[in-house]
Image: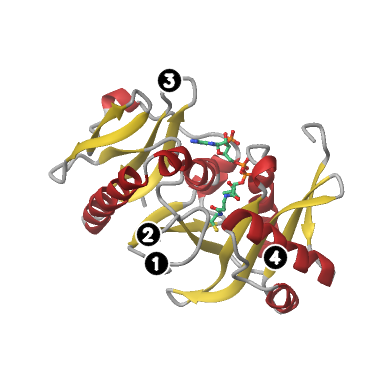
Amino acid sequence: MPNSRILVRPLRALSEFQHCERIQQAVWGSAGVSGELLLVTAKNGGAVLGAFADTHLAGFLYAFLARRNGRLIHWSHLMAVEPEFRDRGLGLRMKIAHRRLALARGIHSVAWTYDPLQSRNAALNIHRLGAEVREYIPDCYGSFHSKIECGLPSDRFVAEWPLTRRRVEQALAGKRRAIAVSSLPCANEVGWKALTLPVNRRFRLDLSEPRLLVEIPADPDRMRDRDIELARRWRLAMRRVFQHYLGKGYRVTDFVSSGDENPRRAFYLLDRTSR
Ligand SMILES: CC(C)(COP(=O)(O)OP(=O)(O)OC[C@H]1O[C@@H](n2cnc3c(N)ncnc32)[C@H](O)[C@@H]1OP(=O)(O)O)[C@@H](O)C(=O)NCCC(=O)NCCS
C-alpha cells in the first residue's frame, strides 16, 4: 500500500459511483449522496473525480455547477479519502485535477465548506491550496449522523478558491511566505489537560492588528474521542472568535502547524490587509 501508484481521473462507470457510496459509509457512517446523483452530476457539468491507489478507488471528489455572487462556479460538496490512504497527497491531487478540469470548462472559482476545527483539512485547503475564508456558518447542516461530527454542531467555514488568483498559484507552487508565529498576536490562549489535550483557557475579541492568529486543536479527532465535552467547548469558543473577526473584515488566509512540537500546535492566520 505505501508504494502503490496513485492515479486521479474522472469517474465514469456506475460501479465506480456506487463505490463512492461505500467510501462515504466508511468516512461519515452514511452515504449522503447516492451513486445515481453522482452519475447525473458528472454527465451534466459537474465533476466527480476518483483517486486510485493502484486499482483501488480510495477517494473521490464531487462538485456541481452553482451560482455564487452572480458567477458560475463549481461547488465542491464532498471530498473523502479512506482513512488508511490519508496524508499521501490524494486529496491534493484530486483538488489539482479538479482545478484543471474546471479551468478547461471556463469555471474560474470553486467553493466548499469544511469544519474549521479539522486541522488536516485546514492544512490542505488553506495552506496548500491557497483557499481563503470570509464566511462562518454555525451549525451549517444541522444535527446529522456522522462518525466525524459525533453529535457536535456542524459549524463550517466556506472556503473560496479563485483558481487563477496569484495567491493560489503561489500556494500550489509551494511558495508561501513562512508565518512567524511567535511575533503575531494570538486571539486565544491554550493550555493542556492531561499534558496532551488542548484547553482553550481564554480568548480575546479586542485585537485590531492587521494580522493575527487563532490556535485550533492539532488533533481534533483524538480530542473528540477522548473528551467530547471539551470538543464542544472548543466548537462554541471558536464560533465566537471566528464570527467576531470575520465580521470585522478579517479573512482566513493561511494555516501553519508544527508537526515536530510535542504536543503539536496548529494556527490559522487572519488578515485584514489582503485582497
Ligand atoms: C480532507 C481529506 C479528503 C484530505 O485527504 P488527504 O488525502 O489526507 O489529503 P492530503 O494528503 O493531500 O493532505 C493532507 C495534509 O494535511 C496534513 N496533516 C495531516 N494531519 C494533520 C494535522 N493533524 N494537523 C495539520 N496538518 C495535518 C498532511 O501532512 C498533508 O499536508 P502536506 O501534504 O503538506 O504534508 C481527508 O482527510 C478526509 O477524507 N477527511 C474526512 C472527510 C472530510 O473532511 N472531507 C472534506 C469536507 S467534505
Q: Amino acid at mark 4?
A: Glu
**Residue 250 x/y as whole percent:** 28, 51
For numbered disc 1, what is the local secondary structure?
Answer: loop
Instruction: Report if the CB atoms under discs 2 and 3 are less than 8 Å apart.
Output: no
The residue to which callout 4 is attached is 21
Few, some or many residues within 10 Å of mark 2 (<14, 14–19, 20+): many
Instruction: Report if the CB atoms under discs 1 and 2 are less than 8 Å apart.
Output: yes
Name the one closer to the observer, 227 or 134.
227
Name the one closer to the observer, 70 or 182.
182
For numbered disc 3, what is the local secondary structure?
Answer: loop
For numbered disc 4, what is the local secondary structure?
Answer: helix
The alpha-carbon separation of the residues under discs 2 and 4 comes to 23 Å
Q: Which mark is residue 61?
A: none
Q: Amino acid at mark 3?
A: Asn
Q: Earlier in the sequence, mark 1 or mark 2?
A: 1
Few, some or many residues within 10 Å of mark 4 (<14, 14–19, 20+): some
The residue to which callout 1 is attached is 140
The residue to which callout 2 is attached is 155
Q: Amino acid at mark 1?
A: Cys
